[in-house]
Structure formats: structure tokens, C-alpha cells
Amino acid sequence: MEPGVVAGTRASLARFIEEMIMPSFNFDSLAAIYDATRGYPDEVATHIAGVLDETVTASTRTRFLEIGVGTGRIALPLAARGRVYTGIDISTQMLSHLEEKLRAAHWDTVEAPWGACGDEVEAPEWVRRFRHTKPEASMRLAVADVHQMPLRDASFDVVIAVHVLHLVENWRRVLEEVRRVLTPGGMFLHCADSRGESGVQEVRSQWRRILLELGHDEQRLYRPSEEALDEVCASWGWQVERWNAITWERSQSPRQVLAGILRRDWSSMRRVPNDLFAEGCKRLERWAAARYGAQMDTPLKDERHFVISRYRVKG
Ligand SMILES: C[S@@+](CC[C@H](N)C(=O)[O-])C[C@H]1O[C@@H](n2cnc3c(N)ncnc32)[C@H](O)[C@@H]1O
């Protein structure tokens, strides 16, 4: 075999291995733009919070845990309904944004060391506690890895995960952790934003095609599939129901979609090796100029859904 071919094969093998064992993606570098790029319109955020609350028939005693809570896009409107809420994340920056939002919404700080609540073990490096009156609610935030949470077994009635399992090193281990901290008869809500009819999707699909041509399969980052998740949960006797909670519409011009890709606004883009990314951008810009021409600033429809999978844990 030619030496160049051997070197090429080695490089692809190295990249294959590197991509198979991927460390968790910490959102520190995306925290400043997270809400501007992923935030829901207010009425959508409120609707989602209401549906999640009803989905688990929550009361003031229901103990919620959100893994990968981020800037509180889901947590804040849900907890503000008068809930007992815990959020775990590896990103101090994301949690700091949530902390700022809680202060702005007049939540009070509560000073208490880790261990003050019965479900707390092994102090995390960063902890904040907040309380709200009218309605009474609490929010406890900790920087920790969801592969190994500093929380006791069977401490939560509901665990929520939104756009996090595809970012962790080992989603099966995280799911085992979720199972460990859930009470018998508890619920696991796995939720995701998805696209319906969308012109924006054409640009994203083209980006994926270009990356594939360059040897980078972006699609493999979006694991686990619903089927894989259902299979593991079913093996534990957890029953699943899945539905779309809300549909709303946004619009973005091809130029805006392109700019988001070039800025690497999404974690999947940050995981593309720099050399491939630069070449991919050149190809995408060429494609977009030919495809949209004078229509580069014409808004494209972008229909969004919020899909909930509810797993009921055996009692
Ligand atoms: C896409 S954001 C989602 C945030 C929030 N759930 C939402 O829907 O807005 C994913 C979050 O998961 C966090 N994350 C990724 N891997 C993690 C891990 N192993 N342990 C804890 N948090 C993790 C990231 O830092 C980030 O804040």
C-alpha cells in the first residue's frame, strides 16, 4: 500500500476513535449567546412550563431535578409556578446566567452549606440556593457532572432532560444515574425542540452533506435515538408516551442561518475539526450564493415543535 494511503487510513482511524469517545460538551463558551440563539418566545416558554407541570401532575411537594439545566430556559418558568427545583450542570457560566436571571426576577439567595438538605452528598465546587415567595418556590443549582451526581438515591419525583443526552460522554451511564435518583413511581421527561416545515432546514441539511463529503458525520452526534432510549427504558419496565406539546413559527433569512453556522453557534459545529470547518464554510457559502442569489435576505419559514417523551418508572 502507498505510504500516503496508510497515513490517510491512520488519520481517519484516529479521527473515528476520537469521535467515538467524546467528552461531555461544556457550554461555558456558548453561555453568552445561549438565550439569544435558543430562547423561546415568552408565551412558548410559559406554555411549555404549564404542559410539563400538568404532565407530571405536580404539586408543591413534587421534587424536580433537571440534568444539564443550562441558563434555565425550561427551569425558570417551571419553578416560578411554585416548584421545588434542582438544576445540575458542568458549566459554571451557564449557571451564572441562570443565577442573574433569578436575581432579576426577585428570587432571594439562601445561604446554607452543601449537606444541609438530606439528599446532598459530596460537596460540589459551586452551589447556589434561591427562594421565591408568592408563589413559594425553591431553586438549588450545583456545578456537577450528571454521570455522577452528588445526590442520594431515590431523591426526586421527576427528572427532566432537554437537549443534554447527546452532549454527554456516556448517555447510558447518565440514564443509570437518572434511574438511581428517581423515586419508584417517578417520571423521567426527555424533551427536545424539533423542526417541522422549514426552509432553514435546507441550509442545515446542506451543511451536513458538505461535512459528510469531508468525512465528518455530524448526524452521529445526535444520539441517543428515540428508539435506543426507549429500548433501555423498556428494559427497566418504564412505559413511554410521546407527543408534541406545542408548535410555533419563527423565520430566518438564509444569510442569518449561514452566519449562525459560520459563528459556530451550535455545539455540533464546535466539534468539527478546524480544518474541515474552514473548508466546509467555503463550500456552504458558494452553495448558498448559487441557491439563494438575490433572496439571501428573504425570511425562510421555520416551524418548531417541543416534543415530550414521558417515561413512567415502575412503582
Ligand atoms: C443544550 S444545553 C440545554 C440546557 C437546558 N436544558 C435547555 O434546554 O435550555 C445543554 C447543557 O448540558 C450541559 N452538560 C453537558 N454535559 C454535561 C454533563 N456531563 N454534566 C452536566 N451538564 C452537562 C451543558 O453545559 C449545557 O449547559
Image (cartoon, rainbow, N blue to C red):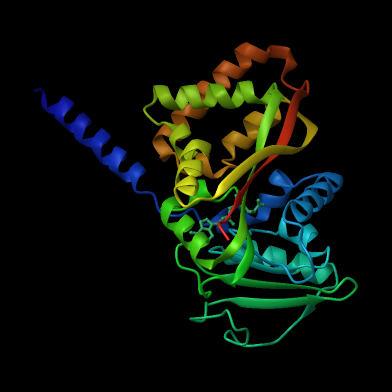
Query: Relative to 264, does residue 95 appear above or below in the rendering?
Result: below
* 73 relative to 143, above or below: above
Residue ID at (50%, 27%): 208
Residue 237 shows in the view: yes
* Residue drawn at (48%, 22%) of the image: 209
Q: Is residue 254 visible?
A: no
Number of numbered discs on residues: 0
Q: Nearer the viewer, residue 278 or 192?
A: 192
Quadrant of the displayed image that contains ligand 1: bottom right
Is 7 located above or below residue 58 in the figure?
A: above
Q: Indicate left or right for 108 with 228 as reference.
A: right
Relative image position of residue 40 (x, y in whole percent): 77, 45
> In the rendering, at what x and y percent does residue 304 appear?
73, 33
Residue nearest the observer in this picture, 129 or 47? 47
Q: Is residue 92 left or right of residue 57?
A: left
User: Residue 9: x and y, percent?
Assistant: 20, 30
Check the picture and name the quadrant holding the C terminus: bottom right
Q: Is residue 226 left or right of residue 253?
A: left
The image position of residue 154, as x and y in percent, is: 55, 70
